[in-house]
Image (cartoon, helix red, strand yellow):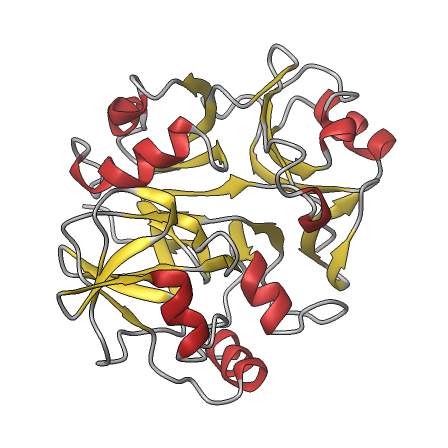
């Protein structure tokens, strides 16, 4: 099924009135007409022809028809905790959050505590930028109803589905805690310097360099029973800083992820075991890079390549998808 479209083709799809989730370069999102869509900035995708980069094309996920009863809602950091209350009783929600924003930190830190957050299916992604533009351009989201493109809101589409169907969130994750040294950090954030290694003070950048830590593998913590990855973005030995694609939090113990063998083969095997046509999927920028996905398919999954994935809460270095399953009624 086709998923990549030109600007003009996307505008035509918007004109149909369907509810859409779009991923594209910021310049493209700003040119699209108003309609029932939300969007996020990113120039990396896994499309119907495989992984690719493009500043001209749009990845389109069709979510619902114009008369489906779907709703588009924007959220601030203060209102985001109420997202489950806005979701349909039977359906799912797709959420896009701008990377490295207060909204990103709020969701990462607190989503697991939101009221009824695990009662209604929630998927989505963290918008990003071309890796050459890191630190120069801020990731953004778009409200298709108004044309607003901003780093100050998160945008969601709440999609009802018929009785007899159920939305199920699936998460494909290569990584688990590795059982080595334990790292704790004195404060929350996307960038760290000081840490404790097995209770002893250290500089984390120095530790990474001195121990030759493989940064293709994330840190992993047990967040209330869930194994959550925190993926490396960069290690700056001169500044003594390590930056991540998701924040670390004080009060949690992190370990370097266990070895997974050949990244490309292991990721292919993980995806190949899931043969599902998903109405929504997204994949991590690091799986794209380390799994060598450019020009290659990931089973039947297409979607944006992200700076973070949402499967009820914030995830890193995973593939998240939504499955609609049939249930018995009555």
Rendered residue at 44%/34% (across/down): 95
Q: Position of residue 46 (x, y in %)?
A: 67, 58
Extreme residue toward the front, this view: 238
Residue 289 seen: yes
How many numbered discs, if any?
A: 0
Give the residue at x 21% y 43%: 118
In-image side of 224 versus 27 (left or right) = left
Q: Residue at 40% of width from left, 48% of height from top?
A: 246
Residue 181, relative to residue 285: is it above or below? below
The x, y position of residue 41, in whole percent, is: 64, 36
Residue 117 on image: x %, y %: 22, 37
Residue at the bottom extreme, as displayed: 261
Q: Image check: 230 left or right of 71?
A: left
**100 relative to 89 in the view: left or right:** right
| Residue 119 location, quadrant | top left
The residue positioned 29% from the left and 17% from the top of the image is 78
**Quarter of the image where one finds residue 173:** bottom left
Q: Position of residue 56 (x, y in %)?
A: 84, 40
Please tell me which residue lies in front, 3 or 258.
258
Judge by depth and name the residue closer to the eye, 250 or 27.
250
The furthest residue to the top: 146
In which quarter of the view is residue 28 placed? top right
Placement of the N terminus among the 4 image quadrants: bottom right
Task: Please state if 165 lies on the left or on the right of 5 as rendered.
Answer: left
Q: Looking at the picture, tell me which residue is in the foreground, 325 or 25.
A: 25
Kindly tell me whether residue 121 is visible in this rendering. no
């Amino acid at each position: 099924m086709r998923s990549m479209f030109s600007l003009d083709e996307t505008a035509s799809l918007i004109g149909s009135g369907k509810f859409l989730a779009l991923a594209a370069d910021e310049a493209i999102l700003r040119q699209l007409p108003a309609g029932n869509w939300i969007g996020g900035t990113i120039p990396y995708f896994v499309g119907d022809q495989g992984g690719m980069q493009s500043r001209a094309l749009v990845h389109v996920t069709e979510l619902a028809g114009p008369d489906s009863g779907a709703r588009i809602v924007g959220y601030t950091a203060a209102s985001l905790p109420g997202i489950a209350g806005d979701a349909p009783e039977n359906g799912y929600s797709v959420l896009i959050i701008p990377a490295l924003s207060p909204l990103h930190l709020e969701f990462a830190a607190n989503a697991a505590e939101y009221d009824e957050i695990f009662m209604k299916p929630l998927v989505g992604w963290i918008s990003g930028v071309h890796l050459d533009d890191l630190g120069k351009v801020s990731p953004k989201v778009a409200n298709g109803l108004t044309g607003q493109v901003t780093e100050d809101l998160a945008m969601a589409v709440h999609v009802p589905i018929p009785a007899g169907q159920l939305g199920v969130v699936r998460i494909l994750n290569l990584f688990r805690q590795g059982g080595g040294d334990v790292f704790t950090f004195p404060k929350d954030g996307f960038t760290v310097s000081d840490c404790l290694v097995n209770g002893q003070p250290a500089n984390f950048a120095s530790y990474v360099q001195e121990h030759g830590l493989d940064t293709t593998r994330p840190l992993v913590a047990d967040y209330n029973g869930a194994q959550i990855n925190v993926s490396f973005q960069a290690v700056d030995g001169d500044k003594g800083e390590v930056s991540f694609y998701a924040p670390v939090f004080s009060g949690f113990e992190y370990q370097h992820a266990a070895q997974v063998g050949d990244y490309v083969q292991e990721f292919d095997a993980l995806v190949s075991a899931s043969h599902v046509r998903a109405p929504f999927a997204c994949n991590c920028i690091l799986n794209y890079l380390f799994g060598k996905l450019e020009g290659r398919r990931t089973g039947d999954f297409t979607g944006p390549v992200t700076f973070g994935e949402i499967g009820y809460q914030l995830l890193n270095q995973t593939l998240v998808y939504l499955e609609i399953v049939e249930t018995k009624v009555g």
